Amino acid sequence: MLINGDRVKHSHFGIGQVVDCEKNVWVYFLEFPEDPKRFSKSTASQMLKVISREEAKSLRLDNLRITFKNDAPNYKNLLESINTFKHTYKLGFDDPVYLDSERNYKIDAHNQAHKLLGESTYKELLDEGDSEEICKRVLKIIGQKSNFLHSIEMIKLNDAMKDSPEAQDLFTKTIYSYLYGAGSDEEKFDLLSNILGIYKVDTWPTFSVLGFLFFPETHIMLKPATVKNAAELSGFNISYETQLNIKTYSQTQKFYQWLRSELEKEGLQPKDLIDIQSFMWIIKKD
């Protein structure tokens, strides 16, 4: 008897995974991501061969997430969203309209981040004990474009970083360690998330924005509605929780990399994670 999560093989559809078998058997097939297939239970037992996860290694299946409503998959098509993006922006991520509306201002913020608080400049200000100036620069970098953080998040962060000289000192040393210090990704995650929690500004956008602006080649931006929408239509489980936690962050990093590979398969050439984040934002608007 088939159960949810079974990896299976079909003679025509190829390798897939059982995603629901309460009434009928629904299977997500790797070669047909836009169209999960339905089988009756008697037909499924004849047409689907259960195989091992070793035979069906797949990051996409490992993180698969499809919701169901009225015995039918509530599933949107990533390929359709990619095609809409390509239709709108004929030159893809090099399209002048895309660059003007989505990428250029983020690159400007990235450049300003390194101009104002590159590693040597940041260290110099720390050594001088000028935490107030560092906080001003951090807020200027984030506040350059209003949509990096919601206005309420920006106000709360501004208040927290101006709370007291002790708060400024704690923020500036923590942010420096997060951006430039030694330690594992998990240690750095805990370091920054703890200080944001102390001052009650521990939202995903506030946590992720600085890493994203300083290091867009490796650091993600996690705006919940935007990322959750893209992950849902991709069938990718990011293990989302509102509270900051390393599992959600790590899964979202994997999702960014997976989505990048899917875009490349369709002929798009994202330069960095700015393009991945911008793509997610655009398809959410659409």
Image: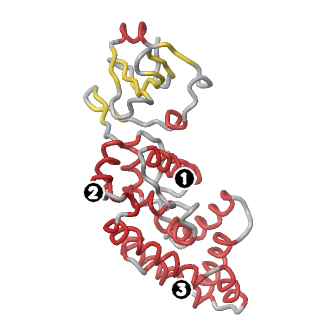
Q: Residue at x 47, y 59 (%)?
A: 222
Residue position marked by numbered label 3 in the rendering = 137
The residue labelled by disc 1 is 253
Q: Is residue 273 left or right of residue 103?
A: right
Q: Earlier in the sequence, mark 1 or mark 2?
A: 2
Q: Is residue 212 above or below residue 244?
A: below
Per the rendering, the mark at residue 72 is: none
Q: Please name the residue that numbered disc 2 is placed on.
A: 88
Residue 23 placement, left or right of 30: left
Residue in front for this viewpoint, 192 or 28: 28
State the SS at label 1.
Answer: helix
Q: Is residue 107 visible?
A: yes
Q: Nearer the viewer, residue 190 or 119?
A: 119
Q: Residue at x 51, y 79 (%)?
A: 160
Q: Nearer the viewer, residue 211 or 158?
A: 211
Task: Check disc 3 and report its element: helix, strand or loop.
Answer: helix
